[in-house]
Every structure is written in C-alpha cells, then in structure tokens.
Amino acid sequence: MAESQFLTVIRIWAAMAWADGTLAEAEASALGRLIAGAQLDEAEAATARGFLDAAVTLDGVDLAALSSEARAGIYRAACRVAAIDRDVAQSERTLLVRLRDTLGLGLDAAREIEASVPGVTIS
C-alpha cells in the first residue's frame, strides 16, 4: 500500500533534517509540530514519529502524483528545514540537489525558491 501524500511529504522533510547525520533539536521540534498537525491515521502517525528516532532517506519516495505547485512547495520547505539549524551542511546541499532533480524542478525555479530562504544557496 502506498503511503499518503501527507506521510510522503513528512518523510521528505525528515530526510532533509537527517541529511547531515543528526537531528538538531530545532529540526526535531519542527518535525514534531508538523506530525502533530498532519492529517494522518494512527499507523501513519506512528510511522512519522519513527522519523524522529532514526535517519530517514529519500529511497523509495514516490512523487509521481504531486502537482508542480506541490513539488515547489516541498522543495521550499526542504530548504527551510535545511536552514533551520542555521548551518546548511554539504550533505544537506547534496540532498537538496537530489530532491530538486527528483521533483523535476528546473534550475531557475530552484534558484528562485532557494533565494526566498535565508542562508540557502544550492544551485
């Protein structure tokens, strides 16, 4: 069974938060609030809470059903997650490039999104 769009988005943001190998307190707090406010059933919520305990990757994430607006929103939020601890590590930059490519965002669109998030310059 495919995961819900909400859980997929949370998985992407968790992967971004874990990209540098650690989950900073600010990142964990932001993800916790996101999980608490998301429209998830109990099984999905349990899965999402697990993202706070162990590193998450983008492996197996299915983005085929997302609109172009949703893809841009996911990338913008991932940029914000990367910058939440005020240190965008090289591993986070690498993951953002991978996410950008996976989302099918053009370089110009990605640069525009990155410019809207203080401290993030990837492309």
Image (tube, grey):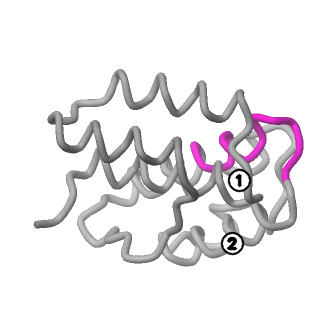
- Which of the labelled discs sits on residue 56, or is there none? none
Residue in the image at 57% along x and 68% along y? 99
Residue in the image at 40% along x and 38% along y? 49
Vertical arrangement, residue 13 with respect to residue 36, above or below: below
In the rendered image, residue 94 lying in the magenta stretch gets the answer no
Which amino acid, by three-letter code, is at mark 1? Answer: Glu
Mark 2 vs mark 1: in front: 2
Vertical arrangement, residue 17 with respect to residue 101, above or below: above
Q: Where is residue 76 in the image (x, y as percent from the top left)?
A: 60, 47
Q: Which residue lies furthest to the front in this view?
A: 53
Mark 1 burial class by Cα count in 10 Å: few <14, some 14-19, many 20+: few
Mark 2 burial class by Cα count in 10 Å: few <14, some 14-19, many 20+: some
Which amino acid, by three-letter code, is at mark 2? Answer: Val
58 and 104: which one is in front? 58
Q: Where is residue 115 in the image (x, y as percent from the top left)?
A: 79, 47
Q: Earlier in the sequence, mark 2 or mark 1?
A: 2
Q: Is mark 2 on a helix, strand or loop?
A: helix
Q: Mark 1 points at which residue?
A: 112
Vertical arrangement, residue 10 with respect to residue 95, above or below: above
Residue in the image at 20% along x and 52% along y? 4
Q: In which quarter of the image is residue 92?
A: bottom right
Q: Name the residue under label 2.
A: 97
Instruction: Give the position of the C terminus as an image quadrant.
Output: bottom right
Q: In this view, does 3 lie to the left or right of 32?
A: left
Q: How many labels does the image show?
A: 2
Q: Where is residue 14 in the image (x, y as percent from the top left)?
A: 53, 49
Q: Where is residue 101 in the image (x, y as percent from the top left)?
A: 57, 77
Measure how far apart labels 2 and 1 are at the Cα level: 14 Å
Instruction: Give the position of the N terminus as an image quadrant.
Output: bottom left
Q: Report the magenta residues as a range.
A: 77-88
Q: Is residue 9 left or right of residue 108?
A: left
